[in-house]
Image (spheres, rainbow, N blue to C red):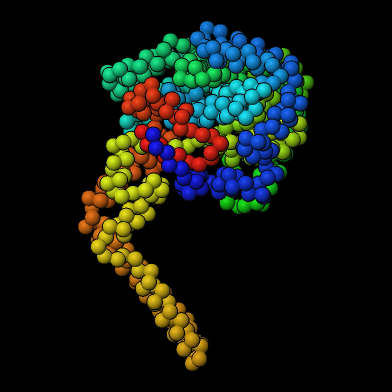
Amino acid sequence: MKVDCIPFKNTGYFSSLISDYLDENKKLKPFYNRFPKIEEFRAQIEEKSNSYPQTSRKTLNQVLQEQYQGVKASKSTLSNISALSQSETFTVATGHQLNIFTGPLYFLYKIISTINLAKALKKAYPRNTFVPVYWMATEDHDFDEINYFNLHNKKLQWNRDSSGAVGRLSTKGLEAVFDTFSKEVGHNTKAETLKNLFKKAYLEHNSLSEATRYLANSLFGEYGLVIVDGDDLKLKNLFAPYIKNDILENQSFTKVNETIAALESVSPSYNIQVNPREINHFYLKDGLRERLLEKEDLFYVNNTDIKFTKDEIMMELDTHPERFSPNVVTRPIYQEVVLPNLCYIGGGGELAYWLELKSSFDAIKVPFPILLLRNSALMISEKENKKIKKLDLIPTDLFLKQNSLINKRIREISNIDIDFSSQREHLSNQFEALYLLAEETDKSFLGAVKAQEVKQLNGLNHLEKRLLKAQKLKLKDQVVRLTALQNQLFPNQSLQERSLNFSELYLELGDKLIPFLLNALNPLKQEFLVLKY
């Protein structure tokens, strides 16, 4: 295995906000608690220890015991569940939607980053126990975001009507996806392993949450991963006071809006990921997950006839907290209330919205977790690596926009110089003299001189582009091979991890895939990895 590292900001695929966060820009310090360095976890452990009650540990342990009924859990996972009842045990967590068959490849990177961070923390703080947690987004209702995965440039999609929380969906209808998947992967040993995994997960479990738990446990259970389903009565009971605060006080709405304004004042280039609502919870029942709205002292469930007075909605919360589902603004608070968590590991978009939330955490006195950007990687096979070498490329070249990559390569291999920078500089120097002459004779000629300079520079630029285009045709074979290689490594001109499904790599590497990634991914390194296998 060979690993090349590229700073995230040099890839061109990460926002200025995330790049500034990784650079520890001082202007961003008010928006997070502690930076993800191993030494910073000591204070995080102390802060969380002082705020997380033993009663919550007891409830969490009980819930996990119930959720793992009927699950073939490893000794490591069972040990971790048991350890969570002890005051010296803490979690590091990631979360993800219930994408069919894991969805994009970065699902693996998220969980492996979490497992590896737990290992690193145990080494640094041996008196404590650190449990890697995958929080399943079972209450999500964005079915169109999770109902497919890509394999060999084909979209394998689960077609059905959907409403309500996706975790409660029946797995009926996934037989058709399985049939398509079976034909696509073939019949060798690795393919049969994948088919068996898909079949057991989705055709032998009743709900999507059960299927996803089975799948994640099969892939990562031996490494002690603990899988949490937040769609749970007992866990919602722990969260009920915070739901009440959101409904009656609208505190998240106020605080997050203040933070958004503060972030925008730091830099207008920061893209705001989420905008809060007055009430940041949904009303949840089977087949129903709709926003809660307040109007004229009544509380309405959007797109339904359900409504409550203030007293009625508080009674509903007291008796049925499981019917209140947090949105993207309050789900992180829910997670941090019910888990003894130290760190959240997520992608760039996730960390961007977490950076909007610290003030709302502070207001309700819940410790804000350390935020760690998950590992990202580009997987390059031996065959692809040979092509890269033959084209005389380096890893950073691959991350260029395709047109820039082609132009750079054509200039490098062309037997004529198609860079008119020196001609442009020479022309500008000539016009400097003309400007001085116009100043000394008749200043009204300055405009004419400027117009002529622009005209001639445009002519040079046009000629350069025409020559470059001609060379591209002349060197068409190089352009075709270069384009095909980049399209293969960057599907749809985006990061491989956002499109490729793990099964494609499993067909090559088999059972070596996850150990390979566990060995390669270092979550505290904070650089983009190019992994050659």
Q: Position of residue 266 (x, y in %)?
A: 65, 51
When the figure is inspected, residue 230 is found, relative to residue 274, above or below; the finding is above
Nearest the camera: 287 or 366?
366
Q: How many marks?
A: 0
Q: Position of residue 245 (x, y in %)?
A: 75, 28
Q: Position of residue 208 (x, y in %)?
A: 49, 17
> Residue sitting at 53 percent across and 39 percent down?
525
When the figure is inspected, residue 481 is found, relative to residue 475, above or below; the finding is above
Outermost residue, bottom direction? Answer: 441
When the figure is inspected, residue 63 is found, relative to residue 308, above or below; the finding is above
Quadrant that contains the N terminus: top left
> Residue sitting at 50 percent across and 41 percent down?
527
In the image, 363: left or right of 469?
A: right
Outermost residue, right direction? Answer: 311
Nearest the camera: 195 or 292?
195
Q: Position of residue 58 (x, y in %)?
A: 70, 13
In the image, 80: left or right of 436?
A: right
In the image, 352: left or right of 253?
A: left
In the image, 417: left or right of 61?
A: left
Give the quadrant of residue 307: top right
> Residue sitting at 62 percent across and 35 percent down?
38
> Residue sitting at 28 percent across and 43 percent down?
387
When the figure is inspected, residue 148 is found, relative to residue 66, above or below; the finding is below
Quadrant that contains the C terminus: top left
Q: Is residue 366 shown to the viewer in this render?
A: no
Q: Is residue 109 shown to the viewer in this render?
A: yes
